[in-house]
Amino acid sequence: MDSLDPAGPIARRIDSLFWLTFWVAVAIFFVVEGAILVAAIFFRDRPKREEPKQTHGNPKLEVAWTVVPILILAALAVPTVKTVFDLTDTSGSEMTIEVIGHQWWFEYVYRAEGITTANVLVIPEDTQVALALTSDDVIHNFWVPRLNGKRYAVPGQVTTLLLQADDPGEYWGQCGEFCGLSHSLMRARVQVLTAAAFDQWVADQQLPAAEPAADSLAAHGLELFQTGLFTADDGVSYACTQCHVIAGVNDQTAQAAPNLTHFASRNVFAGASLDRTAENVARWLSNPPAIKPGSYMPNLNLSQEEITSLVAYLETLN
Ligand code: CUA
């Protein structure tokens, strides 16, 4: 999470603008502080020094210290405004991905490819990607510092943010707008792949969920996912399929929670705040709001046996 370590052309544009402004500010700092030091040292009160001639106003100086800052700011405005407009120009974008903010996780929809995923945004290297951001509930803000600045995700609106990365790798992000109890745990991960690896990823994601071997622990987990009813602390019974979709298992257009079809292909979950290890998934299932305060997934009071089966099933969803 470092804006000063840009990993793509868009972030580099912002970084160059920052350093230009920074060095102009440094020069002004030394000129102003130097003038103060010179005045304080050479014109200080000394014994036998007569009181200097008292004056009021100096039109030439006043015009100078008004006009010079105007010129400096006007000069800086040229690259600033140009950068702002260039960074909203989507004409060079090769693909569009919809980003939907939820309390507290990001959903990614690759409309053309027919893929819905969550928490980990996968993009190809050296490709300008246009994100179409919106929100399902409150205002969120999508921010991956090494790839671009921030952009609001506003309910009922679509905002655009470009991403482009030079090299394959992992880039961390964070929701940049306070959006409720677990805002700080609303993170994002961008995974950048080579073109070939990305094509393979798309092909894999388009497949329906893997089927667990008959009579296995995972098969029992699938059964729990499909038919289990679990009573939360509020006394209401919930089924996994009310909120989660696994392609090939249950079909549902409205998704209140992350699509789990290829859950095990992602290296993080729970708003990208936890590494996807069997231990962490078990910990999450045992009491989600204890990990993410306010989580819409309630504590379903699952038994240890149910948790073990569900974890085994989720692990097969690669
Ligand atoms: Cu979403 Cu903060």
Image (spheres, rainbow, N blue to C red):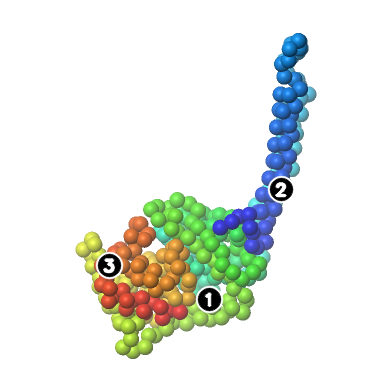
Residue 235 in which image quadrant = bottom left
The mark closer to the camera, 1 or 2, is 2
What's the CA distance linking mark 1 and mark 2?
41 Å
Q: Residue furthest bottom?
A: 214
Residue 8 in which image quadrant = bottom right
Residue that carries the numbered disc 1 in the rendered image: 113
Residue that carries the numbered disc 3 in the rendered image: 300
Q: Amino acid at mark 2?
A: Leu
Residue that carries the numbered disc 2 in the rendered image: 20
What's the CA distance linking mark 2 and mark 3?
54 Å
Q: Name the secondary structure under disc 3.
A: loop
Residue 151: image x %, image y %? 54, 55
Task: Name the N-terminal-most of marks 3 and 1.
Answer: 1
Residue 156: image x %, image y %? 46, 57
**Residue at 42% across / 59% down in the picture?**
104
> Label 3 crowding class (10 Å Cα cut-off): few <14, some 14-19, many 20+?
many
Front one among 291 and 297: 291
Residue 56: image x %, image y %? 72, 15
**Residue at 45% across / 59% down in the picture?**
186
